[in-house]
Image (tube, rainbow, N blue to C red):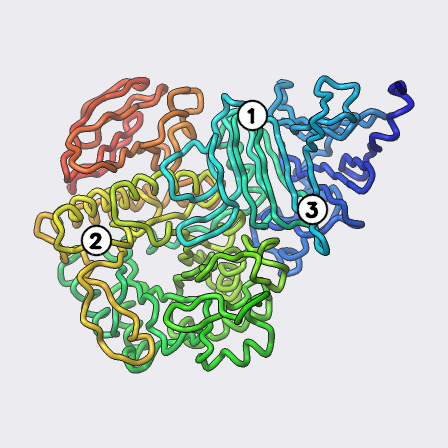
Amino acid sequence: MANQDEVRDVYGYFERKGNALCYRYDAERLIIEPWGQNSLRVRATKLAEMPKEDWALLPRDKTDGASGSDEEQAEGCGTLGCFSDEDAAPVIETRPDGGTIRNGKIKAEINLIGKLTFYNEKGEVLLEEYLRNRRDMFGSTCSSLEVEAREFKPIIGGDYRLTMRFVSNPDEKLYGMGQYQQPFLDVKGADLELAHRNSQASVPFVLSSLGYGFLWNNPAVGRVNFGKNITTWEAFSAKKLDYWITAGDTPAEIEEAYADATGKVPMMPDYAMGYWQCKLRYQTQEELLEVAREYKRRNLPIAVIVVDFFHWPCQGEWKFDPTYWPDPDAMIAELKEMGIELMVSIWPTVDYRSENFEEMKAKGLLIHVESGYPISMDFQGNTLHFDATNPEAREYVWQKAKQNYYDKGVKIFWLDEAEPEYTVYDFENYRYHLGPDVQVGNIYPVMYAKTFFDGMKEQGQKNIINLLRCAWAGSQRYGALVWSGDIKSSFGSMKNQVAAGLNMGIAGIPWWTTDIGGFFGANVYDPEFHELLIRWFEYGCFCPVMRMHGYRWPLQPQYGTTGGATCVSGAPNEVWSYTDEVYEILTSYLRLRERLRPYVTERMKDAHEKGTPVMRPLFYDFPEDKKSWEIEDSYMFGPDVLVKPVTDKGVCSIEVYLPQGAVWKNAWTGEIFEGGQTVTVDAPLAQIPLFTRNGYEIPVEAE
């Protein structure tokens, strides 16, 4: 058997290049470099050169959270160890048998055979690669299993199927990863698809109870399995491995570092913090205006009203159908006089019958279908999506929307179908400007948001916000407000949204909301739905954005047979569309939301300046309280308000855990409790359990 000195060179080379620690063995090239305070970026490839895309990460010279140019977003800065003035140089050591790099509170060590381990400043292991092979003949993990930590499996004639394996600590808790339709806040043990679907948004950032945050910086379709023994990340097609890791003493420190690395939301405009009225769908200009007028006649707060889908002549014609919307300029002007903003639905689909289809097809502005007839969606017509990863396509769509909506006074857009949704989710069958869907597809909603953000910013608009049905890491910097998609109207579905909203916030998307009452399957005359709607409306009052929406039954009579009017409309969905009892409760929460505006404004400043989630799990504000890490059914709305949504039918009392380190007050009764205990409180239909922290007063009753 050879001695150690004789085999070192066989196992790899370690060197410092600029501010990066580099390793190479055979075809693999690995780079570890600082990327923000207490943070490291790890990249590896077996290609001749390291691909330059930064994907979700801001280029290292972008410290203000602003979006970069198209080239920066598509290719990244491509520099090795570029720094801002605020960053200290890392401490790097290389040896013949390994190397280390320390950046603030995080240290990475790479050993003789290329295995990576990450430590915090106390020397505790945060994360280590799972590697079991015979090359580790001098290490404790020597094994005949022949399992690589970083596995690049060639795709014949293509790139690589990438697998990244880490040792799993069975005692850690994991949060984030975006929005999945399941009730678990802690995703440890979960098997998650890294792909977007209607009501599923894969945002691959996870926060660990061990004190680190991890971003899988790869927009490929894949999977992650947070197993008890191994954590496995997979990209089904990739050119490189790319991830970012940060260490922090608190969840807030980790979250803020992540926001610095991927960008922050703009400041939310004041109007958007109020109530948004929406339904599927207002069929005419006069119908929508009459609803807005009725809110004003009743002296009810309303901030935004929505023109939903199929108000256009044809998909891919981004304009009002003049048959049903004859004078949009006058409509928008009247709404503005009432203090109401108009939000207009945009779909990325382009119908073969559209006046724009042939031009967009000829110019290569649509996504491509690899096999079969080129149709990606067939709802209300055969369509292809515009290719949001193509800068020319983004400019084309924005110019149409600018001419037909923005120049008329529309300053907020509903960017629907943002996954994008396909009739069949055969990801391998679609190709974008930036590459195959299976390799880059998760970037689509980011680029869709960028389409409108860049256009609105160029017009001088500030505090930009647009509503999208999907997001990926970095979407927040383009003013993306995400809602949870076309979900069922049920208590079980509502419970899923609580977990989804909190994990979206941890995943770096602080602007999030739901269809209050759910989208599918509710009859406006059903008393059981009335209970659900009330409970959901109460919860919606304590979401970042409060928006009523839904596809209610019975359907309305169809108004017209041409253009978008071929799409049906649901039953009325205004706060007065139900019983007097429902109306009284809903309107009380409309007015409560208005009284909360100063508090909500401060929370939006926190999100804008630091990346702080508006709604977050209890452990975010009480990390020292171990019990807080176990609570999945209540949350903090900002630092001072604890919310316990009622997500079960027929509940009239409920248990609430009050974290240690604070004195708590029942906002409804005034009763005072010491933290660190579970209390049982009344939860009548008209009251969502609310507690305030250390003397903060919430105006639950009008003065």
Task: Report helix, strand or loop for mark 3.
Answer: loop
Q: Can you see residue 459?
A: no
Q: Position of residue 319 (x, y in %)?
A: 39, 76
For label 3, count other residues whose C-alpha is less than 10 Å away and answer few (under 14), some (14-19) or many (20+). many
Q: Position of residue 598 (x, y in %)?
A: 31, 44
Identified by mark 3, the residue type is: Lys
Q: Which mark is residue 522?
A: 2
Q: Which residue is mark 1?
A: 229
Q: Is residue 319 above or below residue 214?
A: below
Q: Which mark is residue 457?
A: none
Task: Report helix, strand or loop for mark 2.
Answer: strand
Q: Position of residue 666 (x, y in %)?
A: 21, 28
Q: Can you see residue 635?
A: yes
Q: Gap between marks 1 and 3, in whole Å?
A: 25 Å
The quadrant of the image that shows the C terminus is: top left
Q: Gap between marks 2 and 3, in whole Å?
A: 46 Å
Q: 553 or 703, which lies in front?
A: 553
What residue lies at 14% left-to-right and 38% top-to-bottom?
A: 685
Give residue 347's quadrant in the image.
Answer: bottom left
Identified by mark 2, the residue type is: Ala
Q: Which mark is residue 240?
A: 3
